[in-house]
Amino acid sequence: MSQRRVAITGLGLVSPYGGDLADFFGRLLAGESAVRFLQTDDIPRPLAMPFVSCPAFDAEASLGRPLAGTMDRFAQLGTAAAFSAWADAGLACGQPAENGENRERWGVSWGTALGGTLAYEKGYKELWIKGRERISPLSVILGMNNAANAHISIQLGLGGVSMSHTVACASSAIAIGEAFRRVRSGEAPVMLTGGSDVPQAYGVARAWEALRVLASGDEKTAPRACRPFSADRDGLVLGEGGAALVLEDWEHAVARGARIHGELIGYGTTCDHSHLVRPEAAGQVRALHLALADGGLSPADIDYVNAHGTATAEGDPVEIAALKTVFGDAAGRLAVSATKSMHGHQLGAAGAVEAIVTVLALREQAIPPTAHLTELDPACAGVDHVTVARHGQPLRAALSNSFAFGGSNAVLAFRAVAP
């Protein structure tokens, strides 16, 4: 069976900047950080750390009270992002019988690292702190990792595969890659894919704090807390969010007159198979090579890389080393930026958020910067770090990197399309 081209016809997100795509990308181009200082009144010790939240998101306004009430926040963010992407693709909401569409092969592929941890934590507090005998009967369906894709499938009447991927910080990149494979093979003409996460549960935040990988900062310095590739970086910044893409068989999209944002052309995924938390360049190199080969690309075809770039001491130099190995003598001209410096690290949603950033960069022919990078760590030198937005760039193809604890690596390759 011949491979089909895969069009990106819908983009949707719930971000700290809101849900408007143009505004989201414009703020990234402007280098505007969404990182703020989070302070809670939790007992026994409040949380106090740089964090990225989505304060404008109103689940009941976006989804309606009955539906929102059956979801943990991660599923609310994901479903709202999916609905936005669906509308952006010009596809009708509601059940297929209402719209004259056969959606029995249309599916959902979703990523989340944490699932409904807020719901589970609430239940634990009810049992262990308040001493109650029972917790909400909705706890299981609120907390299950496949809640977001289940709600999306039900609400949109999608009868094909409905699967969730939990691969730490590579969750949604892998979800997108697996959706891509299904569309390209002809198994599914349309796949809704992406990811969502909310790492704001007290226990989750404390667990990340214990790893000693979180950036420091106070109310004044929090916006600059995440500084990928910088000599003075001191860790990542957690954030919540949801992002979704509609992947569609190219001929199917053209036949219905859909607007095409870009083309997904390659996907590579590997495992370092060496250490749970320490990244290894060799595994990332293999993933990069696989994505290029899958897309029929050479390193010379790539004009931009949206880096995983978390601002951790070990992660950043390893990623740059992998890029230098793959791109060789051309690495010095390779434009690289890490937008987590502004929108934070949404864990399982990060790959989908950054896939959207990469698609918009190609569509708008503009590269967002790595914010707050004023003094480059010599260990991260060797590529063309973008520190101020670049407009009017001749961008043909780009990569989006997602690397995870457990050694999982995922690289997505995108190509620009003529307007």
Image: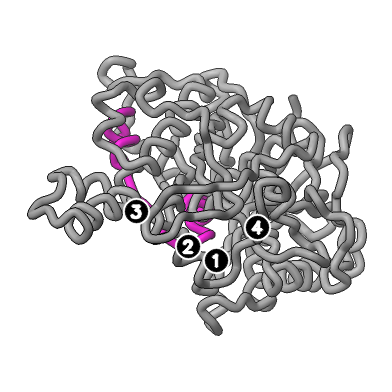
The percent coordinates of residue 382 (x first, y second) are 89, 67
Which of the labelled discs sits on residue 333, or is there none? none
Residue 117 got which mark?
A: 3
**Residue at the spot 67% in from the left edge and 39% down from the top edge:** 359
Between discs 2 and 4, the one toward the N terminus: 2
Is residue 44 highlighted in magenta?
A: no
Q: Residues within 10 Å of mark 4 (few under 14, many from 20)?
A: many
Quadrant of the rendered image containing residue 313: bottom right
Report the magenta residues as a range. 150-177
Q: Is residue 314 above or below residue 116?
A: below
| Contact (Cβ within 8 Å) of mark 2 with mark 1 | yes
Cα–Cα gap, marks 2 and 1? 6 Å
Whether residue 39 can be seen here: yes
Residue 333 placement, left or right of 306: right
Tell me if mark 2 has few (under 14), some (14-19) or many (20+) residues whose alpha carbon lies within 10 angstroms of its own.
Answer: many
| Residue where numbered disc 4 is placed | 401
Which residue is pictured at 45% across the width and 50% down the height? Answer: 200
Which of the two discs, 1 and 3, labels the residue nearer the N terminus?
Answer: 3
Secondary structure type for disc 1: loop
- Residue behind mark 2: 168
Single out the mark in the foreground, 3 or 2: 3
Crowding around mark 1 (Cα neighbors within 10 Å: few <14, some 14 to 19, many 20+) is many
Residue nearest the observer in this picture, 104 or 86: 86
Helix, strand or loop for disc 4: strand
Q: Give the answer, above or below, for where 268 lies relative to 352.
A: below
Give the mark nearer the N terminus: 3 vs 2. 3
The three-letter code of the residue at mark 3 reads Thr
- Circle 3 sits in a helix, a strand or a loop, which is it? helix
Amino acid bearing label 1: Ala
